[in-house]
DNA sequence: GCTAATCTAATCAACTACCAGTTGATTAGCCCATTAGC
């Protein structure tokens, strides 16, 4: 079987893989110095600081973020023997205190979004969601080149696509393990909803069923123009009041159709003309709305 | 072997809608995450 692009779906293949990973970044001495200096100043730089560094170096912000992540990991000489020891250490990093206490975690001490502490929240448009969800149904763990392609299609940064897939995998685990090499990928998105075990209370990331959505069309799926991050170069103007479920619902039906087509093509008599075996696509949206989606896509 | 890239799991926080759920962003990783390119 093949996945989009005609690429083989055997993801385990490590040998000839083309761009399965982002090409390794090679830092110049100057860049490394700048990073080390910034790290010594603050091992948890804000988004704005990371962006400034990225601009200086002509690299994506995500590279800076990953560098800081790796650096923190590498320099974490955590032995609980209290004393921080010499001021030297690797890179002379002072106190890399992990913000462990609940509440003070991660962001250190919360700050307002205006300060640029964290990247402005991306708001995905229905069209973007549709593309991503569809891609997730086909391949929940896209490789680098596939993510780049998706980034182009959605006009999102590649790392936003990457993060979206990470979140998606943890919140919508695919039935029968993430990916099964050689298996028809559409089978990982079964059309029949599983019985809901019970409404999960707050924060239950991975205990969800494979397809938690019910097949009932939400009444209020009215497209309307929504806000987006103006002034944020990475945000996007198309953002309507669709919920993910609305889009997924549409997608579920599209996927069901694709699956049906697939099965039909596998089992059909080759003498039957193709036109005769393609079922009519039922649109969960008005034709008008549907075309709006399509126009948004292209 | 070093280290950039990647992963999972947990968590925070902005939004939406009506207070709890959804979801984008960030972080750690503990016999110090694993994988893979140079």
Image (tube, coloured by chain):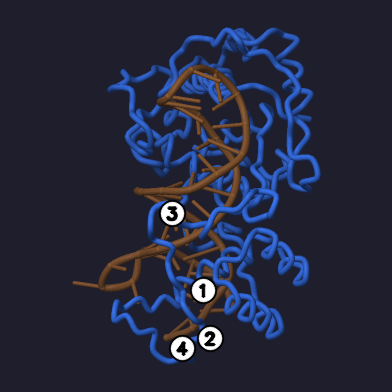
Chain colours: A blue, B brown
Labelled pair 1, 2 in contact (Cβ < 8 Å): yes
Closer to the N terminus: mark 1 or mark 2? 1
* Residue annotated with mark 1: A71
Is residue A187 among what the camera can see? Answer: yes
C-alpha span from label 2 to label 4: 6 Å
Q: How many residues crowd mark 1 within 10 Å: few (<14), some (14–19), many (20+)? A: some
Please identify, in this view, whether the residue under mark 2 or under mark 3 is nearer the observer: 2
* Residue at the image point whose x is 55% and y is 53% from the top: A110
A29, A117: nearer the viewer: A117
Could you confirm whether marks 2 and 4 are on the same chain?
yes
Left-right relation of A194 to A96: left
Closer to the N terminus: mark 3 or mark 1? 3
Please identify, in this view, whether the residue under mark 3 or under mark 1 is nearer the observer: 1
C-alpha span from label 1 to label 4: 13 Å
* Residue at the image point whose x is 70% and y is 60% from the top: A48
Q: How many residues crowd mark 4 within 10 Å: few (<14), some (14–19), many (20+)? A: few
Q: Examine the image and state in which quarter residue A280 appears.
A: top right
Q: Position of residue A217 (x, y in %)?
A: 53, 10
Q: Chain of mark 2?
A: A
* Residue annotated with mark 2: A91
Residue A100: give its label: none
Judged from the image, the secondary structure of the residue bearing numbered disc 1 is helix
Q: Position of residue A235 (x, y in %)?
A: 74, 42
Labelled pair 2, 3 in contact (Cβ < 8 Å): no
Could you confirm whether marks 1 and 4 are on the same chain?
yes
Residue A12: give its label: 3
Q: Is residue B25 above or below residue A36?
A: above
Closer to the N terminus: mark 1 or mark 4? 1
Q: Chain of mark 4?
A: A
Residue A89: give its label: 4
Is residue A281 among what the camera can see? Answer: no
């Amino acid at each position: 079987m093949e996945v989009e692009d005609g690429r083989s779906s055997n993801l385990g293949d490590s040998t000839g893989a083309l761009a399965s990973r982002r090409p390794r970044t090679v830092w110049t001495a100057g860049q490394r110095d700048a990073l080390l200096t910034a790290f010594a100043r603050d091992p948890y730089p804000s988004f704005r600081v990371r962006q400034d560094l990225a601009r200086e170096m002509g690299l994506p912000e995500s590279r800076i973020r990953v560098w800081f992540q790796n650096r923190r990991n590498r320099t974490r000489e955590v032995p609980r023997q209290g004393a921080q020891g010499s001021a030297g250490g690797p890179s002379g990093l002072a106190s890399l205190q992990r913000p462990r206490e609940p509440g003070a975690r991660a962001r250190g001490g919360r700050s307002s979004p205006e300060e640029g502490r964290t990247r402005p929240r991306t708001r995905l448009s229905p069209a973007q969601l549709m593309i991503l969800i569809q891609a997730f149904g086909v391949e929940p763990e896209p490789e680098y080149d596939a993510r780049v392609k998706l980034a182009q299609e959605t006009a999102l940064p590649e790392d936003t696509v990457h993060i979206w897939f990470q979140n998606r995998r943890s919140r919508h685990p695919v039935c029968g393990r993430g990916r099964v090499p050689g298996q028809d990928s559409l089978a990982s998105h079964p059309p029949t909803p599983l019985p809901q075990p019970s409404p999960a209370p707050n924060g239950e990331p991975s205990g969800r069923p494979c397809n938690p959505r019910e097949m009932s069309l939400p009444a209020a799926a009215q497209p309307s123009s929504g806000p987006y991050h103006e002034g944020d170069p990475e945000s996007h103007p198309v953002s309507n009041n669709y919920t993910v479920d609305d889009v997924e619902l549409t997608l579920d039906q599209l996927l069901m159709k694709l699956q049906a087509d697939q099965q039909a093509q596998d089992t059909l008599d080759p003498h039957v003309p193709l036109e005769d075996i393609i079922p009519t696509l039922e649109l969960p949206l008005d034709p008008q709305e549907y075309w709006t989606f399509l126009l948004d896509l292209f």
